[in-house]
Image (cartoon, helix red, strand yellow):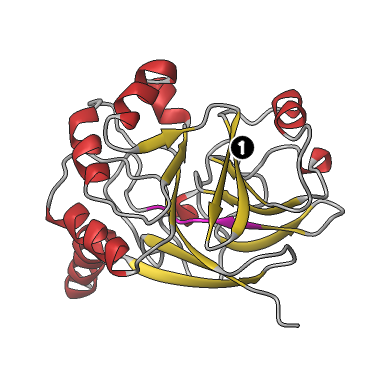
Amino acid sequence: MGALGGAFCADALWYEPQAVEVEQLSLPLNTPGKGFRIVQLSDLHLRDNDRYFQKVSEKVNQLRPDLIMLTGDYMEGDRNIHGVLDFLKGLKAGYGIYAVQGNWEYWSRLEGENLRRHFAGVGVTLLINQRADLEVNGQAISVLGLDYPSTSDRLQRLQQELDPQRFNLLLSHVPGFPHENLNEHINLILSGHTHGGQVRLPLLPPLYLPRYSGRFVSGLYSVSRHDIPLYVNRGVGTNTFPVRFLCRPEISVIEATAATS
């Protein structure tokens, strides 16, 4: 029993929290244009930009993303904004890095225009209920950043005048928001927040999920009457306790592939 307990502690406290995995998702485009690659990171909860986070940065850059999407919760209670900025400065994407805020940005009191200025200084565009239009490999893309918490009125205002000829990508830190108000022209939603449950037991539901998780834990879902794909990232860091079990940290890679004629 002592040996099993020791093995469990070693796995949950040391191995799994640093055993970051790359998860791949292929998404066929139904809009005109060529394909592109998105890398999603979420829930850093960065206490120190240590060797682990340097490894994460190296893995992301090796994936050669066209775009990097960041879905919130960058800091912990110690408000280590300088460590977060140092980490973000090391990320490379051909067509830009876009971000939304999570609940920890508000709890840390480093949110809004203050955080936007910090992020802009390291080349990251923070979207606070805003849309950014760009073009990647001939594909017109709109990135919509829905701020925490993701309310119905904010979502409806953000979706006004969406162009169905563009690939419309919605970022929301929380996956549990009013999906019934989603526009049919949203092509993909990226979220985090849940940490995948962080500590899992075989054949059992998560022991704990934070508020605004809804029914979502991790991976790919289909939401709203329009069957919009929603991907929930397990996060890079850990929340409250530096423990993971049967739930490794994640870097998500979304390959948006051109439709075949």
The C terminus: image quadrant: bottom right
The location of residue 13, given as percent across then percent down, is: 22, 57
Is residue 91 a member of the stretch shown in magenta?
no
What amino acid type is highlighted by mark number 1?
Answer: Tyr
Judge whether 41 appears above or below 65 on screen: above
Q: Which residue is farthest left?
A: 51
- Magenta-drawn segment: 230-235
The residue that appears at 74% across and 35% down in the rendered structure is 159
- Residue 80 visible in the picture: no
Q: Is residue 232 magenta?
A: yes
- On the rendered image, what quadrant is the N terminus found in? bottom left
- Looking at the image, which residue is at 68% across and 61% down? 221
Residue reaching furthest front? 138
**Residue 95 percent location from the top left of the image:** 43, 52
Residue 200, above or below 225: below
- Classify residue 256 as left or right of residue 55: right
Q: Nearer the viewer, residue 253 or 161?
A: 161
Whether residue 17 is visible, yes or no, is: yes
Q: Is residue 198 above or below residue 182?
A: below
10 Å neighbourhood of mark 1: few (<14), some, or many (≥20)?
A: some
x, y (%) of residue 254?
Answer: 52, 66
Q: Quadrant of residue 23?
A: bottom left
The residue indicated by pointer 1 is: 212
Left/right placement of residue 143 relative to residue 10 reads right
Instruction: Out of 18 and 96, give the one closest to the viewer.
Output: 96
Residue at the (42%, 35%) spot, across then down: 125
Question: Residue at image x 24%, y 56%?
Answer: 57
